[in-house]
Amino acid sequence: MTLIFFKPRMLPRFACQLRATVCSITLMVTGGLAIASEAVLSPFESHYDVNYSGFAAGREISLARDGPDYILRSTTTLRGFARLSGMGPVYEVSRFEFRDGVIRPRLYTVGDGEDNPKRDIRIEFDWDLGVSHGFAKGKDQSFPLEPGMQDPLTFELMARLELTRGASNLQFRVHEGHRVRGYTFNKQGVETLEVRGQPVQVTRYFIDRNSSRELYYWFDPDTLYLAMQLRQRHKGRTKGTVTLTHSTLLD
């Protein structure tokens, strides 16, 4: 260890230099976070192929601004013979605000456009009162709002924000409508996926939700951690796979 001594007349100058250095580092860090947030929260549209238990579908996800708020939408539409079931598209919408670097959901809804209390979900987040009101499976339930709580749609976007900022330990509380559950992102390594006919190096995460239905994500660090693939497994078998086919983030 080396000890450095300063003459008294040097202290004011050193203090000014130290303050300037600290301010510069702070501006670099906060500026980098702001740039990352601005990039991830820029409007986009992504399309995915869905295969779930033999049924084929297409999923479209988009992000847009609406005044001070953001609107995150997901529309899933059955394809092929699955359309003969008569089930229409499933619409999932989240309205949220972005405050102090964190997504704060305000309203989340999911439904097929028809009044169906057993399938419809509606969650209202009252941050002033600290309560989230949920309607799911035909029942109303309320839970205390916890800092950073997300909804079933925004947690992925919040994860992308954190990963872009360099975070490695991701944990979220997610209000799913009839319950609040913890989501822990466990990094499992780097793999190569074929996306749109091209090999893409992606990072695989296991999302621990304390559920028998295992959820996996493959994020691409080179495209602001855009989700290239999702997979759900149950009792050792793959139940569903969602694969990116196009995104304006890749144009």
Image (spheres, grey):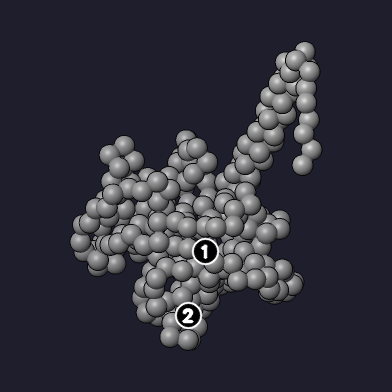
- Position above or below: 66 against 63: above
Q: Is residue 164 above or below residue 8?
A: below
- For label 1, the crowd category at 10 Å Cα-Cα, with few meaning under 14, some 14 to 19 and many 20 or more, is many
Quadrant of residue 153 within the rendered picture: bottom left
Q: Amino acid at mark 1?
A: Phe
Question: At x 30% / y 62%, what residue is drawn?
Answer: 179
The image position of residue 229, as x and y in percent, is 59, 70
Whether residue 48 can be seen here: no
Q: Position of residue 54 (x, y in %)?
A: 48, 85
Provide the secondary structure element on which disc 1 rests.
strand
Question: For the residues carrying marks 2 and 1, which lies nearer the camera in this image?
Answer: 1
Point out the tag, 2 or 1, that comes first from the N-terminus.
Answer: 1
Q: Image point 42% across, 76% down: which residue?
A: 213
Q: What is the quadrant of residue 12 in the picture? A: top right
Q: Residue furthest top?
A: 9
Give the labeled residue for mark 2: 233
| Mark 2 residue element | strand
Q: Position of residue 217 (x, y in %)?
A: 56, 68
Say if residue 134 shows up in the picture: yes
Identify which amino acid the numbered label 2 is placed on: Arg
State how far apart marks 2 and 1 are (Cα): 16 Å
- On the image, which quarter does residue 6 sit in? top right
- Rendered view: 228 above or below 240: above
Residue 101 or residue 121, whichever sits in front: 101
- Near mark 2 (Cα within 10 A), the count class, few <14, some 14-19 or many ≥20, is some
Q: Look at 43% across and 48% down and name the residue there.
A: 148
Residue 127 placement, left or right of 53: left
From the top left corner, tell me how far across and down residue 78 is, in percent.
Answer: 46, 74
User: Which residue: 59% across, 57% down?
Assistant: 168
The residue indicated by pointer 1 is 185
Q: Is residue 188 above or below residue 165?
A: below
